[in-house]
Image (tube, rainbow, N blue to C red):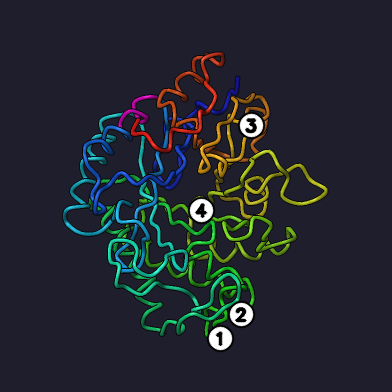
Amino acid sequence: MSNTLFTPFTVRGLTLPNRIVMAPMTRSFSPNGVPGQNVVDYYERRAKSDVGLILTEGTVIDRLGSGNDPNYPRFYGDDALAGWKAVSEAVAKTPGKIAPQLWHVGMVRKHGTGHNPEAQSDSPSGVTHTGKTVMEAPTDEEVADMVNSYARSAKSAKDLGFDAIEIHGAHGYLIDQFFWGVMNKREDKYGGDLNDRATFAADIIRECRKAVGEDMPIILRFSQWKQQDYAAKLADTPEKLEAFLKVFVDAGVDVLHCSQRRFWEPEFDGSHLNLAGWAKKLTGLPTITVGSVGLDGDFFEAFQGKGAEAASLDELFERIDKGEFDMVAVGRALLQDPHWATKVKEGRFEDLAAYDGKALATLY
């Protein structure tokens, strides 16, 4: 078993009890955006069972068009924030730590959906992933409010006693739409080449830092692939990736959460390093790897109700022991079994179950 996975890790003064992270997994269990006791119990169970850092399911920020499902949890409004305060207080009584994932779905949202059905969806340029223009590009003032919306929720996270925040900049949602040249046709500071298109996220990081102060870690989740295009790559060489990530380093991000569909796949030809391995090598920042950890099937199959067999963790142990990345985010395995981390810690590998494909529809 890994000698590293269950050792503490410290970032910006926050010490995690181990390197296991609960990956953010979208669930629709917060009616009208308000998390209830079932959500408190869901996170508390895992925090009590050797998960070092919980990243919550995506929580939508206070732009009216930020969500496309009224049962996604909000991270704004007194009623929703009271629910999240109960979550924070429950986790604070355990060894684990917790960070909300701050989220805006952007053009993924269809008009008439979400908490505010009549609201307009946000986008970089009013252009879909197919290149079709469907609305006017947002004004400078509207983009500024998008940036500040993340910061307002970050301030709420600080006030509610959360330990860190994660900014969702992956998977073809709003921030990633700014990254992606297919959807970002702006001609101001937020448009241009890839490094310029990263300015939107950099401004969010800076404003969130002002909101949370100097002691709270800021995590950025990013990906190359998009849910609209699994083969998409923002950076197709290490040199381009280095320049892209430097924008976030300069903005003051603390941790890079590097999303892959399968963590074991190399990011570039000629090296075994995955995306988290390259990000750490190129920036020196701590990184989180993620992607089908402990299972042999792609996580998108779960949304089709498909199961996956339990897989060996030997390669994961080897890579983290070598220092390729610093933390490991676990998704479906922890969704189905709140005691997964404890079983791994105790070497009970025979008790690690296959994923039955139905856990997304349960409370656990």
Q: Which mark is residue 221?
A: 4
Residue 12 among magenta residues: no
Q: Which mark is residue 296?
A: 3
- Residue at the image point whose x is 37% and y is 34% from the top: 362
Mark 4 vs 1: CB contact within 8 A:
no
Mark 4 vs 3: CB contact within 8 A:
no
Where does the image place residue 19, in percent across and percent down from the top left?
50, 33
Q: Amino acid at mark 1?
A: Glu
Choose between 107 and 253: the one closer to the eye: 107
User: Which of labels 2 and 3 is toward the front?
Assistant: 3
Q: Which residue is mark 2?
A: 192
Q: Which residue is mark 1?
A: 187
Where does the image place residue 183, in percent across and percent down from the top left?
57, 73
Secondary element type, mark 2? loop
Q: Which mark is residue 151?
A: none
Mark 1 vs 3: CB contact within 8 A:
no
Graded by Cα atoms within 10 Å as few (under 14), some (14 to 19) or many (20 or more), the crowding at tag 4 reads some
